[in-house]
Image (tube, helix red, strand yellow):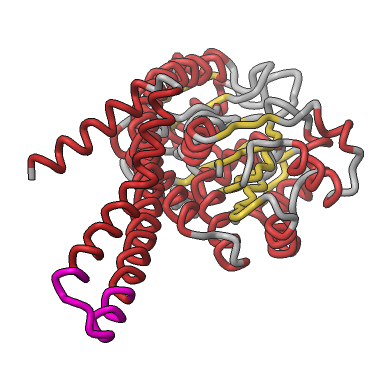
């Protein structure tokens, strides 16, 4: 038996391909049970997100083709169209891959935390579908443990690595209580939405969104809260704002030095933070010369992002060492599981032999045979029966010159005579 991980992700396939093999929540139970019922798979978990679809299988062999055929058939795709995007890992490599995925080391954004929750949801879905047994119960708990250790013992998930999140992190450093700050977002595009979502997560509730069209600003505030404004109200909104984050597509600055000077006077020189995420600039460069004003451009933030990404890369090396230890622990557990099965089968076999010989002895005693003779015969039969297979194994090892096996037999029998 082996552990397999096969799938596609953002590094091997484009979005349109990934969409074709994604599993919807309502499909999962049927898919998991179908995968197990096709014969080769004993246990299965399917992880399906926007960036990856992966099958984790406790299987009878390392053959990829039956799993690939199942995936293509389930999604009604030509198998040859799918084959070029698929990667495969087996046994230790599969275990290590799962742990890397759970820890965010295989994500589009290195160290992102959402994937751990997605893997946990996938595991719970497989549990509910009845496709998780002893091995996968231990495997996935080991993966969650590894991910938790990586989160607590390394910086792989620390330090912002997106410009939008870096902007919010910067604001947190300057304002002790971000939730008490009033924020003005200028623009309502994708960057503005992502920034607004991060602000909402940090507890910001005093939020104004100014955009060229107020209707688009309203679409954004419907998602993240706050009040929408047309860009024509920008000058009157500035004095109220502790933090201004701008990301329009304007070819010229929308916030000038004069407006900010006026705003600072009206605020009685209470500090303001300006974060300009636009290219070209939304905020005149001279604004940064004013007292009580902090101005950061997208280039400033990109430098922070690059530094943080480097720190995450360094932390990822530590994380892989942690994964190596957890993989080894799981490997040792699998080995112990095999030895438990071996010992159980061995004891069952030997007990059956002893019971048969005991029954023969009892029958002989009941027939009036001399007890000493019965005991001697019992001893002789047990000795011959118990020695038969070990004798054949030693002879075969000698013929094949299997020195490892002969050494193991020698150690076993020496240890027995020493007791």
The answer to whether any part of residue 239 appears in the image is no
Rendering quarter of residue 280: top right
In percent of width and height, residue 357 lies at: 32, 68
In this rendering, would 106 be left or right of 14?
Answer: left
The answer to whether any part of residue 37 appears in the image is yes
Q: Which residue is found at the position 60% from the left and 25% from the top?
A: 277
In this rendering, would 85 be left or right of 295?
Answer: right
In this view, the residue in front, 400 or 277, is 400
Q: Which residue is found at the position 79% from the left and 47% from the top?
A: 70
In percent of width and height, residue 226 lies at: 59, 54
Count of marks overlaid on the render:
0
In this rendering, would 378 be left or right of 212?
Answer: left
In the rendered image, residue 81 lying in the magenta stretch gets the answer no
Answer above or below: position of 291 versus 136: above
In percent of width and height, residue 106 lies at: 55, 30
Rendering quarter of residue 356: bottom left
Magenta region, main secondary structure: helix
Answer above or below: position of 190 versus 255: below
Q: Which residue is found at the position 60% from the left and 52% from the top?
A: 45
Rendering quarter of residue 382: bottom left
User: Magenta segment range?
Assistant: 360-374
């Amino acid at each position: 038996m082996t552990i397999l991980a096969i799938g596609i992700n953002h590094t091997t396939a484009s979005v349109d391909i990934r969409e074709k093999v994604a599993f919807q929540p309502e499909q999962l139970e049927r898919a998991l049970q179908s995968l197990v019922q096709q014969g080769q798979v004993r246990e299965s978990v399917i992880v399906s997100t926007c960036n990856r679809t992966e099958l984790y299988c406790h299987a009878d062999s390392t053959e990829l083709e039956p799993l690939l055929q199942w995936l293509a058939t389930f999604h009604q795709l030509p198998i040859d169209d799918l084959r070029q995007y698929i990667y495969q890992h087996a046994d230790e490599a599969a275990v290590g891959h799962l742990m890397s995925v759970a820890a965010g080391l295989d994500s589009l954004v290195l160290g992102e935390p959402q994937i751990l929750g997605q893997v946990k949801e996938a595991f719970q879905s497989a549990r509910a579908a009845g496709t998780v047994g002893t091995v996968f119960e231990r495997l996935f708990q080991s993966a969650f443990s590894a991910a938790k250790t990586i989160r607590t013992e390394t910086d792989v998930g620390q330090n912002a690595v997106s410009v939008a999140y870096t902007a919010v992190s910067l604001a947190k450093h300057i304002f002790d209580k971000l939730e008490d700050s009033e924020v003005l977002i200028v623009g309502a595009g994708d960057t503005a939405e992502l920034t607004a979502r991060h602000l909402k997560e940090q507890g910001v509730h005093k939020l104004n969104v100014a955009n060229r069209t107020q209707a688009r600003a309203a679409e954004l505030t419907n998602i993240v809260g706050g009040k929408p404004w047309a860009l024509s109200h920008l000058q009157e909104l500035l004095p109220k704002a502790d933090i201004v984050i701008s990301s329009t597509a304007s070819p010229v600055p929308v916030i000038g030095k004069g407006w900010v000077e006026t705003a600072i006077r009206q605020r009685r020189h209470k500090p303001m933070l300006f974060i300009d995420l636009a290219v070209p600039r939304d905020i005149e460069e001279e604004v940064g010369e004013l007292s009580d004003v902090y101005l950061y451009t997208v280039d400033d933030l990109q430098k922070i992002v690059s530094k943080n990404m480097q720190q995450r890369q360094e932390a990822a090396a530590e994380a892989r060492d942690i994964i190596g230890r957890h993989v080894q622990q799981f490997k040792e557990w699998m080995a112990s599981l095999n030895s438990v099965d071996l010992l159980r089968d061995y004891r069952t076999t030997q007990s059956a032999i002893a019971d048969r010989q005991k029954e023969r002895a009892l029958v002989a005693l009941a027939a009036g045979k001399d007890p000493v003779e019965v005991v001697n015969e019992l001893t002789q039969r047990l000795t011959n029966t118990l020695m038969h297979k070990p004798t054949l194994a030693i002879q075969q090892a000698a013929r094949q010159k299997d020195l490892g096996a002969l050494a193991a037999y020698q150690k076993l029998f020496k240890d027995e005579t020493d007791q």
